Image: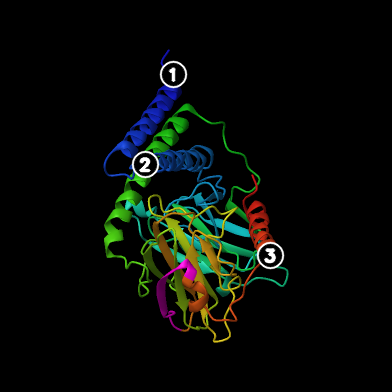
Amino acid sequence: MTNNSVTAWHQFCDSLREAGDFLAGDEFPNSSQADQAEGVRHLSRMTILALTQFVEANNTEFPRFVRQNDDVTQWGGNNLDNGYYIAHVDQSSDYRIYGNASSASGFILSARDGYMHENKLACKDLSSANMQIDDDGNFEVIVSQTEQAGNWLEMIPGTTQLGIRVYYYNWETETPPVFQLVKIGNEGLSPPRLSEQVLVDNLGQAGEWLQCNLLYWNKWMKDRAPHLPVNRVSKPHSVPGGSNEVITYSGGRYEIGDDEALVVTFEPINAEYLGFMLYTDAWFETMDMHNRLGGFNNQQLAVDTDGRIRVVITAHDPGVNNWIDNEARSKGLMTLRTINGDVPPDTSSRLVKISELGAVLPTDTCRLNLQQRREQIMTRREHMVSRFHR
C-alpha cells in the first residue's frame, strides 16, 4: 500500500537537502567554517518555523497564533524589542482576537496577504494605540471584510494570515501579553482528526516556504548591501510588506577592525520609540539575544547631558552603558527604527581606535564597572527567558 504521508515526508527531506546544497553554493556566504556553521544553523531554525506554522498551525477553521522571529527562528531583520506572532486565516471568514495586553508597551495587529518572499506586500494594520482597551488591559478585535462597531481590523482582499507585533520598551518589567484567536461560529467546537491529505499538503507548503524564504533573503541582502552607507546610518526609508505607517527605518553597514570602535551619535528627538541594533552580515539575524548587548531602545540608552545619545560598537567592552557588542564580527548591518517620532533622527558617526574613545566621548558619559555590566546582561537574559520560554 502506498503511504502518501511517508512519501510527502521524503519529499520534505529532499527539500531540506536541496536547501543545504544552496548553502554550499557561491551565492551564499561560505568562505569560512564559521559561515558554514551559521548557515546550517539558520537552515535548522527555518526548518523549525516551517514545520510549526504549516504542519502544526495551518488550520483556518481553528487558527492559533504561533511565535516566529524569536530567539531561535530569526529571519528578515527582526527587532530585538518585538515579539512576533502569526496565524493562518481564510478571508471569507470572520475572526475574533481577544486577550490582555497590560504587560507590554503596545502591539500592532496586521491582516496580510502573505510573506515578502512570496511578493505579497498588501497589509492592513491596527495599532493598540488606536484601540478601545479597558483599564485592566483587556481588549477584543473583530477581523472581517464588513466594518464592525468597536475595534475592527479590515480583512483585506487576499488575506491569508494575521500577524502581531508586540513592543517591549522596559525589559525589566514587561512580559508577553495573552492573545486568543477564534473563528466566529466555531467557539467550543473541535477540528476533525488529521487526515493524510492535509498532512501531505502542509508538508509541501513547509518545504516550499523554507526554500523560498532562504533564497529570497539571501538575494535581498546581496542586492541591498552595496547601496548601504558604510559606518554611518542612512536617511529614513520605507520598507514594504508589513511596516506600519508610524514606523521609520534607517540602515547602514559597519566595518570595524579589532582595535577600532564606531561611535554613532543621535541628535535629540521626541519619539515614542527609538531602537538601534546590529545584524549578522550573512543571515540578517540579531546578535546573541540572551548573552550579548546587540542593541538598545530609548528606555535602555543613557543620554548625555547635551541631550545626545552615543552608542559605541566594538568587540571589546569599553565600560560605557551604551556598548553594542558586535561579537568580534568585522562586518555587519545596523538598523535604526523609530515610532511616532516628531521627525526622523539625525545621526553622525566616527570610527576611532579603541585607545581614542576617552577623548571622543563626553566626560559625563554613563559608565559601568564589571559588576554593573554583568547585571545589565542578566536583566536582558531574564527578560528573554520570560518572553520566549519554551
Question: Of callouts 3 and 2, which one flags the residue occurring earlier in the amino acid sequence?
Answer: 2
Q: In whole angstroms, how far apart are the C-alphas of marks 3 and 1?
A: 59 Å
Q: Which residue is mark 2?
A: 32
Q: In whole angstroms, how far apart are the C-alphas of marks 3 and 2?
A: 35 Å
Residue at figure coordinates x 32%, y 34% from the top left: 21
Q: Is residue 336 visible?
A: yes
Residue at figure coordinates x 39%, y 33% from the top left: 16
Q: Amino acid at mark 1?
A: Asn
Q: Mark 1 or 2, which is nearer the eye?
A: 2
Q: Is residue 134 above or below residue 66?
A: below
Question: Of callouts 3 and 1, which one flags the residue occurring earlier in the amino acid sequence?
Answer: 1
| Residue furthest right as drawn | 136
Span shown in magenta: 343-355
Q: Which mark is residue 372?
A: 3
Neighbours of disc 1 within 10 Å: few (<14), some (14-19), many (20+): few
Secondary structure category for the residue under label 2? loop
Q: Which mark is residue 3?
A: 1
Q: Position of residue 339 (x, y in %)?
A: 50, 74
Was residue 150 drawn as part of the magenta stretch in this picture? no
1 relative to 221 in the view: left or right: right
